Image (cartoon, rainbow, N blue to C red):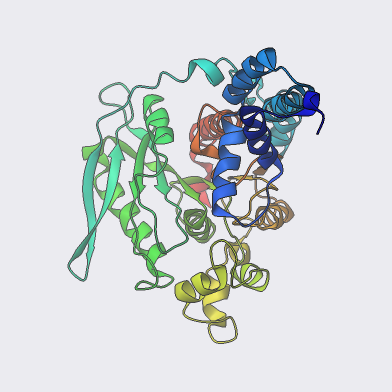
Amino acid sequence: MNKSWRVGLLPLVLLLVSLTYFNRTESSFLWKVSIGATEYGHWLALLAGIVLVRAKTRGSVVATTVALVLFLLPLVQLVVGLSRWDQEFKIGLGLTNASDKIDVRYRTLFLGRHDAEVDIKTLTFATHAGIPLQLDFYPGNAEKGTSNPWVVVLHGGGWNSGDRRQLSKLNHHLADRGISVASVSYRLAPEAKWPAPLEDVRDAISFLKNQATTLGLDANRYVVLGRSAGGQIAESLAFRSTRDAGLRGCIAFYAPSDLNFAYRNAKEDDLLKSPGLIRDYLGGEPIKSATQYQDASPLNHVTSYAPPTLLFHGPNDPLVWARHSERLFARLQEYGVPSALVSIPWATHGFDYNLNGPGGLLSTSAIDRFLDFVFKQENERASL
């Protein structure tokens, strides 16, 4: 190779990391690297810029330049696409006020957030087989004597793992805005099968409503939010709770909404070993446990009475196909449910790990606007 085209080790590493922007392979390592490349890419771009200035060969210059462009691509897409997302968000939810726009503060990318971390209370809300089920309660920072709206957060983990302490920065952010948060544990597969997690979340909500006065909660204003497996549970609960006037909305990140669809399109050796995971969760294959698959699929429970719903997904997700959220959004729109799908082109599974990354900025701002909208609504749903 001509010496002028030799590529140094650091430029080569930066190039390889940046190329995971395109990653859709079922590799746990590459999936995690792709989160770093896209949601921390603005920081990596600074490193690439320094390396580029010091590059001494054509090969290093070319490799570092390509890496720099790819690291900045999510930020560029965010800036270019924000007005489109904002318009789709407003149309889908029927918003008319200018203050309801998705307002991204780009300085957060480098300066971070300054949300106060609240003191967390761990509470036991139920007991099964002598084992306590607990939730972490984040009290909203509001004036004393105020009854706060609240969000029930359900963790991911493929139904057989994960815990309520996942991705807690959003919980602190919401609490700092005066919205209380309950991050809930639920029983896991294979010991606990569907609908055990749904029952656990219902128990947690009943507990919180009964303790509303003590905890400073408004029992008639809450939203469910779930990620991945927790999103399936959140959607299932939301679309069945047509008589609960207190449930104001549902938020789901990269959630599987049709378990039959998920099973048919999964491979035994995929990243999650999905077919076995689903069988453990639902008690067998679809032909054996057809009722379970039907019942556990939120898509099957959408009606015109479903609460406003906000969905997040990205086409680069190697764990849960983005078609799940696309199909669910189409069903919600078919029934006239106020709903929005924020489809983020660079996003992979877990893209919201960094609240200060491009995906984290977009999703957190959209959540803030969504909660402002649903919590400010009058109690017209109470009369349904």
Q: Is residue 142 above or below residue 289?
A: above
Left or right: 355 as drawn, with respect to 20? left
Q: Residue at position x 39%, y 64% from top?
A: 197
Furthest-bottom residue in this view: 288
Nearest the viewer among 336 and 150 is 150
- State how many labels appear: 0
Task: Tell me the quarter of the picture where residue 348 sits.
Answer: top right
Q: Is residue 33 above or below residue 265?
A: above
Nearest the viewer among 123 and 63 is 63
Q: Is residue 305 above or below residue 93?
A: below
Measuring from the top left, give residue 74's x and y in whole percent.
68, 30
Q: Residue at position x 38%, y 68% from top?
A: 196
Measuring from the top left, give residue 317's x and y in whole percent.
64, 50
Left or right: 32 as drawn, with respect to 12? left
Measuring from the top left, give residue 179's x and y in whole percent.
39, 32
- Report whether residue 113 is seen: yes
Q: Is residue 359 above or below residue 176?
A: below
User: Considering the image in quadrants, where does the N terminus appear?
Assistant: top right
